[in-house]
Image (spheres, grey):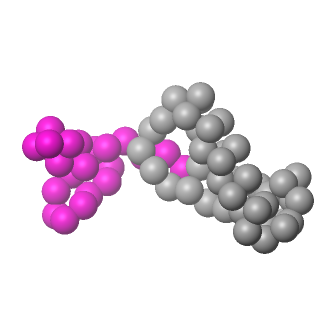
Amino acid sequence: MPTIKIEMTKQTKEKKQEIIEKVTQTMHEVTNIPKQSFSIYINEYDADSIGVGGVLLSERHKQG
């Protein structure tokens, strides 16, 4: 059972469903492993809990 872990900012239920469908489809196409075999875990974080280049992601988004 292949496991895929994704860590990202918070998303809507609809966006998570889209991500899961597309990642599963892509991995199936590349590996020929049946789609039913994949488990995907999405860990979500607030933009205030992520730092990029020494700056909070929430602040970076404000800067454009």
- Report if residue 11 lies within the magenta region: no
| Image-quadrant location for residue 63 | top left
Count of residue discs: 0
At 55% from the left and 34% from the top, the residue drawn is 15
Q: Is residue 29 visible?
A: yes
**Left or right placement of residue 34 versus residue 23 in this view:** right
Q: Nearer the viewer, residue 18 or 40?
A: 18
User: What is the residue that sits farthest to the front in this orientation?
Assistant: 29
Residue 23: image x %, image y %?
65, 53
**Left or right placement of residue 44 versus residue 32 in this view:** left
At 72% from the left and 53% from the top, the residue drawn is 24
User: What is the residue that sits farthest to the bottom in this orientation?
Assistant: 31
Residue 4: image x %, image y %?
67, 62
Q: Nearer the viewer, residue 38 or 44?
A: 38
User: Which quarter shows the N terminus?
Assistant: bottom right
Residue 46: image x %, image y %?
37, 42
- Relative vertical location of residue 29 with respect to residue 21 in this rendering, above or below: below
At 65% from the left and 48% from the top, the residue drawn is 22
Q: Is residue 3 visible?
A: no
Q: Which residues are magenta?
A: 43-64
Q: Nearer the viewer, residue 22 or 1?
A: 22
- Report if residue 62 lies within the magenta region: yes
- Relative vertical location of residue 24 with respect to residue 31 in this rendering, above or below: above
Residue 64: image x %, image y %?
14, 42
User: What is the residue that sits farthest to the left in this orientation?
Assistant: 63
Q: Nearer the viewer, residue 57 or 36?
A: 36
- Relative vertical location of residue 20 with respect to residue 38 in this rendering, above or below: above
